[in-house]
Amino acid sequence: MSLSISSLRKNDNVLVITGKDRGKRGRILKVLASKKGGAPRFIVEGVNLIKRHTKPNPGKNIKGGIVEREATLHASNVQLVCPECSAQTRIGYKTLGDNSRALAALQRRSYMRGWPRYRAAGLSMQVDLASALADSSATRDARTRLAAIRQ
């Protein structure tokens, strides 16, 4: 399994690189865990639309008819879109000076940009990788901003 496949998370913007919807962009709505340790599958907003024939169910307040909804995509069929330059990119991890890891976009075999992900209560904080590598004060500032948002 590729490093970039396991690094994609909910609300990341991705580009479909293969299949009938090749070239479409969307936001990850849901990440579905794989069975038997394989790559995960994603539900991407507005991509891989299918028509589902549903029966009416008054108990659950569902109207019958043909419903169009998103189907899952395999992780190998999508690629992350860089939030700064909005181009598709491969991603990797870079260890910062304070031993924290930053998710970095790989451009021409070098680390150009990145963002450490601090996950608490569903929030993520973005920090420029170059400033975070220069000194760890940018990382500390991001942590204090996140703590202020949480309160």
Image: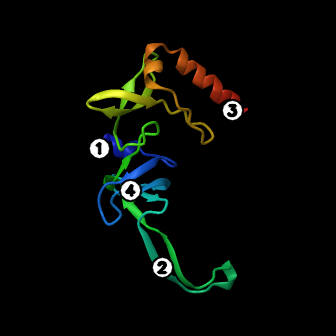
Measured in 3D between alpha carbons, the distance from the residue under mark 1 to the one under mark 2, in whole angstroms, is 32 Å
Which mark identifies residue 142? none
Q: Nearer the viewer, mark 2 or mark 4?
A: 2
Q: Secondary structure at mark 3?
A: helix
Left or right: residue 124 versus residue 51 is right
Instruction: Please rate how many residues cluster around mark 1, counting C-alpha atoms within 10 Å: few if below 14, some from 14 to 19, many from 20.
Output: few
What percent of the width, then of the height, locates residue 86?
Answer: 42, 42
Q: Are marks 2 and 3 in contact (CB under 8 Å)?
A: no
The residue to which callout 4 is attached is 34
Callout 1 amino acid:
Ser
Measured in 3D between alpha carbons, the distance from the residue under mark 2 to the one under mark 4, in whole angstroms, is 23 Å
Q: Which label's residue is closer to the chain start, 2 or 4?
A: 4
Which mark identifies residue 52? 2
Q: Are marks 1 and 2 in contact (CB under 8 Å)?
A: no
The residue to which callout 3 is attached is 149
Instruction: Please rate how many residues cluster around mark 2, counting C-alpha atoms within 10 Å: few if below 14, some from 14 to 19, many from 20.
Output: few
Residue at 32% in and 56% down: 77
Callout 4 amino acid:
Ser
Residue at 43% in and 63% down: 47
Q: Are marks 4 and 3 in contact (CB under 8 Å)?
A: no
Q: Secondary structure at mark 1?
A: loop
Measured in 3D between alpha carbons, the distance from the residue under mark 3 to the one under mark 1, in whole angstroms, is 33 Å
What percent of the width, then of the height, locates residue 115?
Answer: 47, 31
Rendering quarter of residue 138: top right
* In this view, 122 is above or below 54: above
Residue furthest right as drawn? 151
Callout 2 amino acid:
Arg
Measured in 3D between alpha carbons, the distance from the residue under mark 4 to the one under mark 3, in whole angstroms, is 33 Å
Measured in 3D between alpha carbons, the distance from the residue under mark 2 to the one under mark 3, in whole angstroms, is 41 Å
Residue furthest left as drawn? 109
The residue to which callout 1 is attached is 2
